Amino acid sequence: MDDQGIVTLTMDMPGQAVNTMTQAFRDAYREAVERIEQERQNIVGVVLTSNKPTFFGGGDLKGLLAAEDAAALFARAEATKATMRRLEKLGKPVVAAINGAALGGGFELGLACHARFAINDGSVQLGLPETGLGLIPGAGGIVRLVRMLGLEAAMSLVLDGVVFSPERALELKLLNGVARDKDELLAQARRWILDNPEASQPWDRNGFRIPGSTPNAAAPLAWLRTAPMLLMKKHRSRYPALEAAMSAAIEGAAVDFDTACRIESRYLANVAIGGVAKNVIRTFFFQMNDIKARKSRPEGVPDASFERIGVLGAGLMGRGIAQVAAQRGISVVLKDVSREQAEKAKSQIESGLQKQVEKGRLSADRMSAALALIKPTENPSDLTGSELIIEAVFEDRDLKRSVTQEAEPYLARGGIFASNTSTLPITGLAQASANPASYIGLHFFSPVDRMPLVEIIKGAMTSAETLARAYDFVRQINKTPIVVNDSRGFFTSRVFGTFTREAGAMLAEGVDPAAIENAAIWAGMPVGPLAVMDETSLTLAWTVRRQTVADLQAEGKPAPAHPHWAVVDRMVNALKRPGRAGGGGFYEYPAGGKKRIWPGLRDHFPPSSTQIPLEDAYFGDGERRFQAIVSSCFAR
């Protein structure tokens, strides 16, 4: 407490790089609030700030990952909110001096204060991103945000997990001001306390009404009627956190503040112990942090950066790789069998970038700079000096051997060679290399400019240095690297193959193609498996299959049989429908119209008279429960 009677509560949890909502924090926070209550008569106001570079990092995700008891989690959330509420209702002004990032629980701590000021720095991020981890804000964030902004505006921030800058927060009136540095920040907080001695939260005052509400509805009726359905249409009830967040908001808007907080706690406890949240937390927090920490990168190898690369093959994948590399400032030699084809690929890259410019996603200058870095050619000698060469030709072992041996001599000293193969084992492909230790797999995904993942495949002879340099390249082009061992199909293609093979088998067994596509969509996939096979090319799938059969025969092993392959064989070879790029496959693509399932598909693969019940395929308890919640809210 200073000589003006202003208490500064500083969060600085020992042994942690950031403050998080651990039990140790909750205990310390409760004890501090109890002391403030005891000394209330001598206190003019309270400033909440941090001694870490960040303000507060959010929930204790390790603790949430281990949580199995919903009742215990509910009680814990309620206890935390009770402490926040005691400070909020102290009868003295409480101000958050946000000196760094305040996300999730950290931002909720700020919302529980009567005013908020933040350092206006590019590194400072604010918001409630919990839905991105399969959770919902559970420390009053939904309840307070709804009462500050209104139901409709608050939901757009919560459901999308929006993270924003201090300037944007100021525009949203979620901050009272911004400061240049911590000294100015604390000065602003203290000044606000002295200027607002009778501060209280709006929702604790008589006559308060949620912004945008009417006596009969908590939000515009048009939004109340459509928002839940639009949410279901987008996520198909396969992402429980989104339904929970909207339900907590809508139900909470119909009751008093403290009841709304209990509703929020119940929804948090429900989603946090579920498998979806735990899987998302593991993948998108802990495993992504491992990637950012470079745990899969061999230690002791100096960091590498690339200025010049070569790409062999100017098809869909090759031009995609060339584009993303050029957009990151890397010079690219794009080689194909003819200059005409290479030039055409560059022209296609330009068309794609121009669309981004027209939509305001890319500046014309940046487009021009990227295109200037791409050199189309048919001459292998133009690859001279490339620090990395990536072959992205068809899945044919002989072709890959040929282009490898043609291009490899032009690598720069110490350069590495990579294959963009999606299935063929890297150890086998590396036999074509004069230096197998410098050969590796870099499996990109289509469309390359939009898909963040790249598989790095380590062959039996791949050196640690090559693996480290490949990892550095993937990070340089702003992609997410996952390192996998060498195996036919690696990791993602085996997962993807299971999805598509099951669809082919279902089609062969007489399941209606529309039922296959819709079942997959309602299961949560962005598009159906037949559409995916069209996009990725049935011809490519059949080429991979033939190469796999040949490889296994050479090894004296039988190729695994599956009814899916008879479907692909018939589509490609008998019906001449190789996929979208070839004019059509399972779907037809009318010029200027929407794609639709090819009418002839049911003639060649007749649906059985007995079909899987659509209700079993599409709907489960989750959708019925959500629909009941929304109906009950309308009934109020």
Image: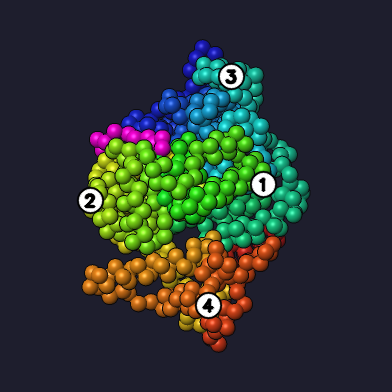
Q: In this view of the protein, which residue sits in the foreground, 11 or 393?
A: 393
Question: Could you tell me if the residues under marks 2 and 3 are in contact, i.e. CB atoms within 8 Å?
Answer: no
Is the Cβ of the residue at disc 4 closer than 8 Å to that at disc 2? no
* Residue holding disc 1: 151
Q: Which element carries disc 1, helix, strand or loop? A: helix
Residue extending farthest to the top is: 3
Q: Main secondary structure of the magenta part?
A: loop
426 up-or-down from 143: above or below: below
Specify the segment rendered in magenta: 298-308
Residue 583, horizontal then vertical, whole percent: 58, 67
Say how many tags the image has.
4
Q: Which residue is mark 4?
A: 575
Residue 9 to residue 277: above or below: above
Label 3 secondary element: helix
Q: Residues within 10 Å of mark 2 (few under 14, many from 20)?
A: some
Q: Amino acid at mark 3?
A: Gln
- Who is closer to the viewer here, 246 or 206? 246
Tag 1 and tag 3, C-beta contact below 8 Å: no
Q: Amino acid at mark 1?
A: Leu
Q: Nearer the viewer, mark 4 or mark 2?
A: 4
Q: Which residue is mark 3?
A: 188
Quadrant of the rendered image containing residue 438: top left
Tag 2 or tag 1, which sits nearer the N-term?
1
Q: Is label 1 or label 2 in front?
A: 2
Q: Quadrant of residue 367?
A: top right
Q: CA distance from mark 2 to mark 3?
A: 61 Å
Q: Residue at x 55, y 51 (%)?
A: 344
In the image, 328 versus 521, the foreground residue is 328
The residue singled out by tag 2 in the image is: 461
Residue 148 in the image: state x and y as whole percent.
Answer: 65, 38
Q: Residue at x 32, y 71 (%)?
A: 549
